[in-house]
Amino acid sequence: MTSPQVVPTPSDPNSTATQISRVFELSDLRPSTRRTYELAVKGFLTWNGTRALGPSTLIEYKNALLLRSDLSAKTKNLYLSAVRTVVRRLFELGILEVDLSKTVRSLTISSKHKHTPISDSQVRHALSYVAGLADAQGNIAPPQPDEPKRRRGTSPPPSGALAFA
């Protein structure tokens, strides 16, 4: 079974697109990994055009990714990592004489916009606040988190009835 072409391959067997297509033909990749790499490489080939791979190509591509505001830092890193892996594979297969991927490091992802998940106590606090607002406006308060959920089709116990656990 042959791999689908990443981009239309020029007739030049030394073109970057042709060389990268060979990587997909000669590599045993999981289908999800293959799709990720093909997507990332397609963007790289569009950016690179018909230029041959050189020592600064991946660094220039990394800089171009840094300038893109339509991609998150994580997506930029994914694209760069996929292209680096494919270029490393070109070296392993003997298509490239030098491993051009060694000189390019991953992007640094800032953690200043990352937040820890909301805690249980914060959820309880928010619910009690909302319940207080609803009561002040005369609306029915939402159920409290500690109230047991009733099964569908059952009615609540009568007022003043004893509840047994």
Image: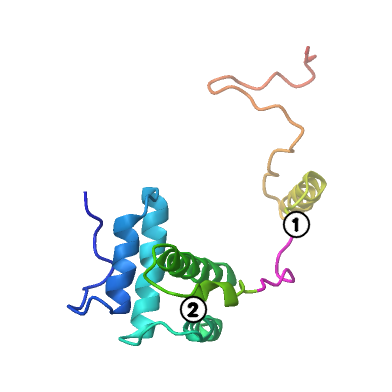
| Colour setup of the view | rainbow
User: In the displayed structure, does residue 23 sit left or right of residue 138?
Assistant: left
Residue extending furthest toward the left: 11
Residue 42 spot, x, y in % from top left: 34, 72
Q: Amino acid at mark 2?
A: Asp
- Let me know if residue 127 is in the magenta part: no
SS type, badge 1: loop
Classify mark 2: residues with Cα within 10 Å, few (<14), some (14-19) or many (20+): few
Dominant SS in magenta: loop
Where on the picture, by quarter, is residue 23?
Answer: bottom left
Say which residue appears at 39% left-offset and 67% top-offset: 94
- Let me know if residue 115 is in the magenta part: yes
Examine the rendering and report whether any part of residue 72 can be seen: no
Classify mark 1: residues with Cα within 10 Å, few (<14), some (14-19) or many (20+): few
Instruction: Give the camera-side residue of 5 and 14.
Output: 14
Q: What residue does disc 2 label? A: 70
Say which residue appears at 30% left-offset and 64% top-offset: 22
Say which residue appears at 36% left-offset and 54% top-offset: 27
Examine the rendering and report whether any part of residue 85 can be seen: yes
Q: Amino acid at mark 1?
A: Thr
Q: What residue does disc 1 label? A: 116
